Image (cartoon, rainbow, N blue to C red):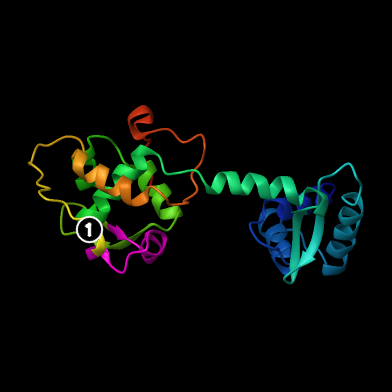
Amino acid sequence: MESLKQNIEALIFTAEQSITINEIQGALKAAYGWEVTSENIREIIAELTSRYESDDYAFELMEIAGGFRFLSKKDYYGIVNTMLQINSKKKLTTAALETLAIIAYKQPVSKPEIENIRGVNCDYSIQKLLEKELIVIQGKGDGPGKPLLYGISKNFMDHFGLKSAKDLPKLKDVVFDENEIGTPAEMIDSVENTLTHSDIPEESNETSDEQTHETDGNL
């Protein structure tokens, strides 16, 4: 158990929420078979807490919500808040907007149907839209492989001030030919106008589907 302290530090650092002593014990036992007492873990956490009190670190180890978590120190709240505000104003990429537009107007719709319309793989955009809770899985289709069907979420309605999908901008004639490639311009323009003032965060380094050809992923 020479690296016990480092393992506990890594568990706390990577935890998305406060991690409890029981969870730390469970992880150590599952990974290494180590039986570590809660008292031993608390002693190590106390050492780590003392270390990160130093001005050399911009974050500290705190006990909150029944567990432990690394948090930025108060002196840096301003710069962290500025970064969060900047990120919150970033809009969805064109690729994500196109995918969201198709789902909004064609729901429930499967990934193969979306890709047939857009002409490129849509794994990445769909995954991002799911992570942002703008779309939801509505079931499975009857086609080959029973593909997942996607539709817009309540969160989508809240973001864009819609009571239901019926409140989406009306499209005069959205007719898709069987072999059509690409998304009709009127569909994209309509949704982009709806989303103009939205504050949905998006990663600054995200590229379009056309540039990346989006690697396959399990959705």
**From which residue to which does the magenta span run?**
150-166
Vertical relation: 59 (above or below) 159: above
Secondary structure type for disc 1: loop
Vertical relation: 107 (above or below) 206: below
Q: Position of residue 63 (x, y in %)?
A: 80, 65
Residue most extreme to the bottom: 66
Whether residue 212 appears in this view of the structure is yes
Q: Give the quarter of the image for residue 109.
A: bottom left
In the depicted view, which residue is nearer to us: 98 or 30? 98
- Please report the residue visible at 51 percent of the width from the left and 34 percent of the height from the top: 205
Left or right: 133 as drawn, with respect to 162: right
Crowd band around label 1 with a 10 angstrom C-alpha radius: few (<14), some (14–19), many (20+): some
- Please report the residue visible at 72 percent of the width from the left and 69 percent of the height from the top: 22
Q: Position of residue 207 (x, y in %)?
A: 43, 33
In the depicted view, which residue is nearer to us: 219 or 196? 196
Type of the residue with mark 1: Gln
Q: Position of residue 33 (x, y in %)?
A: 72, 58
- Is residue 200 a member of the stretch shown in magenta? no
- Please report the residue visible at 78 percent of the width from the left and 63 percent of the height from the top: 35
Left or right: 214 as drawn, with respect to 114: right
Vertical relation: 125 (above or below) 16: above
Whether residue 147 appears in this view of the structure is no
- Please report the residue visible at 82 percent of the width from the left and 50 percent of the height from the top: 75
User: Label 1 belongs to which residue?
Assistant: 107
